[in-house]
Amino acid sequence: MGVGRKLKHWIGDERVDLARSRLHEFAEQSTERHLRLAVTGLSQSGKTIFITSLVHHLLHAHRSGSLPFFEVAASGRVVSSRDLSTASEHPFPLRQALAGLSQDPPQWPESTTGLSEVRLAIRYRRPAGLRRVLGETGTLYLDIIDYPGEWLLDLPLLEMSFEQWCEQQTQLFAGEPRAKVAQGWLAQLGEIDWTAPADPAVLRRLADGFASVLQQLRTGPDGLSLLQPGRAVLPGEYAGSELIELFPLMIDHWPSGEVPAGSYLDLLRSRYDQYCEQIIKPFYSRYFSRFDRQIVLVDCLKTLNRGEACFEDMKAALSAILESFNYGRSGFLRRLFAPRIDKVLFASTKADHVTANQHHNLDRFLELIVEEAQRNIRFDGIETRSLALSSIRSTQAAQAQMDGQVLSCLRGISKENGEEVALFPGEVPTELPGADDWNEERFRFIDFAPRRLPLNDLEAKHHIRLDQVLEYMTGDLFR
Amino acid sequence: MSESKRRQGAVWLDLDKLEAAEQAPKESARVQEVPLDQVVDIADNEGVELIESPAPRRRRGWKKLFGFSLGAVVVTGVGAELYRLLSWGFSIHLGVGIGFSVLLALLAISGGVQIWRSFKGLRQLRDTERLHDRARELLEHSGQGRSAALLAGLERRYQDQAGHSSVIDAIRELDSAYSDREVVQFLSRHALESQDAAARRCVQRYSVESGVMVALSPWATFDMLLVGWRNLRMLREIAGIYGIAPGAAAQWKLLKSVLHGLAFAGASEMAIDAGSAALGSSLTSTLSARAGQGLGAGLFTARTGLQAQKLCRPLPLERDEGRVFDAVAKGIVQRLGGSK
């Protein structure tokens, strides 16, 4: 038995692996600068396209001039950057995404179904000053991971027991639109004696039923996002596994007294614990516990199109998710041993889908959605900011004469039918619209197809505020 | 109120009716697009802004009267004297008279040119101040559509000046999605890059030179004259760098504002100054007292130069100034060390 094996035996596999990766990181970070950027967002909020565009612009930062607000690039201090993702187990499919965006007609990348990593090394010239002592050039390693937003919603489960989760879900499913969609399935739950010995086939049927309820809620008119467990919506590598045959027990009368071993209730509870231990925890401790900075992407326009239920649901989902990250001041030593997030940026994506004079309103509306989460984060003394951004600009600003007045509008290609349209999509409200205002007449934020993104010769007009995101997130590390 | 405020609903538009605002991305059309839809807003804003406090009006009356009467007395006095000179010249000989008139004409023409120049400089200074104020205001504002006046002003100011094409280029490069604050930040960073670098070099050079001169010159009164002379030269050069015609009136006004700025410096600048003084003392403890004086004079010149740069630059300066002070202090000590 080798020493490593013995250690593992004593302390547990996971901890040894964790300690080893920490040590590895320590060695790396003490010599070079390292930044783990958390790109957080619900599904369809534009994480993949954000990462694609960010990496693409950074890889060309040394010559393109497409990032005027990113100081290190604008002042020509970026020597070169290199994509190190190929060394990873699951490299980010940058090439495919870029190929899709640069072909004719260009296409948005496919929705993400699995986890992937990007690692970028950026070599820069240090500005004149004390840090020059360390050498004329420095290297910053930037780590980003991409994952399906559905899985993010599993993180809050780590803090809850099975009973707490069931109670919370019962409350959720008491409200519309969940109650209506889940009506039939809930009735099935009532027919079963939960203390009786479990029949796996029945559980499987119920789990499948719950998964289809979640799918309906997700794709339905309200487009809900607070759907747990996340693997039931998108199983990933666990497709067909028993581990994810899990659903919350939403019954009026919780069976009292001792729970017999091997009963339905016992089995469900142990599955929940397994789900937390074997699926969420490794995912969390491997990828989510060691971030330095965070950007939270929110699709505000979706909530405006879908209505109040979607708005409230997204708000709840975001606050739940953001509670599972570590926030706090992150000094040099902290960053080495137990990094915490010390800067958070809230960004509303698809800023190109509204006219430029509405960007300010979009910021304000975003603050409505993330209000609670932002308050908690600020309480920890963390710097936050909100911003309207567009990773890839798919529309052109234009003007039209309407009834004798000039109206600014957008011109782009509709994603739905591929035809060119011109549209003033309505004003973004700065406070929560009343019940009467959620209607088709007031806003119609249609989805646009992307405009072609060149593989070279990037310009500032290919994105909106991506450079400011970079400056805010990484600017101080290049000084 | 703005009419676009009224229109809240979504509107589909006919493609043919569109005026593509960004058809030709490098043309100034893109920039023009921002103002057009919210012109009313700017007018609203100006209305609020222009309400002045009427209090100091009364005092002005006497001052104006004094200036006017003094001017009238001097003009009539000089005019009468000149007339007597001319008539005396003609009474002696026709040639002498013609000689006098030619001299007087030369004087009048050159004087006129001087006055015109200095008025131009004054006007440019005033313009700069106005642009500066407007930019500062826009920095506080997070909406969109108020930057048109600033852009038009900048464009007018730098349009026909050689060596300032970077300003016009930067205005062309502005993105239609930028908010007013971003417009100012973008221009402040990218429009005046070369000018800023030149101004910083100029300040540094003059400060180090005057510091070294003071440290080496043996007469105390001479020092004062030297520093004053270097400072005036520097002011003129900085004004020139930012495209302000260096007339006497403009220079005088600039000097006045610079001194005013120095005298009523804010707490932060005081702090910088205290810092540089501390730095000075630690450096000069190894040098003679005279070298310390030189360092003080150099830092004073640097402060004057930065103040002048702030006044001549049409956009607010956002970078830190500590670096210039450091560089000046180091430069003086190095030169003195080398010359010893």
Image (spheres, rainbow, N blue to C red):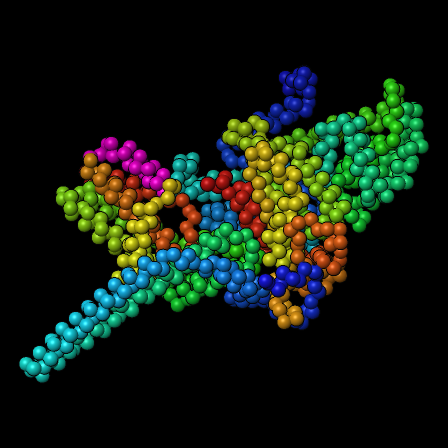
The answer to whether A191 is drawn above or below residue B169 in the figure is above
> Would residue B16 appear left or right of A57 to someone viewing this image?
right
Residue A331 falls left or right of residue A242: left
Does the magenta run of residues contain B271?
yes
Residue placed most toward the observer, A453 or A435: A435
Picture residue at 38% right of the left edge, 56% below the top: B55
Q: Position of residue B9 (x, y in %)?
A: 70, 60
Q: Can residue A404 be seen in this view?
A: yes
Residue farthest along the front direction in this orientation: B58
| Magenta residues, dominant SS class | helix
Q: Quadrant of residue B296?
A: top left
Residue at the far bottom in the pictured view: B94
In the depicted structure, whether residue B52 falls above or below residue A21: below
Magenta stretch contains residue B87: no
Residue at figure coordinates x 22%, y 41% from the top left: B294
Magenta extent:
B269-288
Where residue A320 appears, x then y in whole percent?
70, 36
- Quadrant containing the C terminus of chain B is top left
Point out residue A130 in the picture as x, y percentages from the top left corner: 40, 37
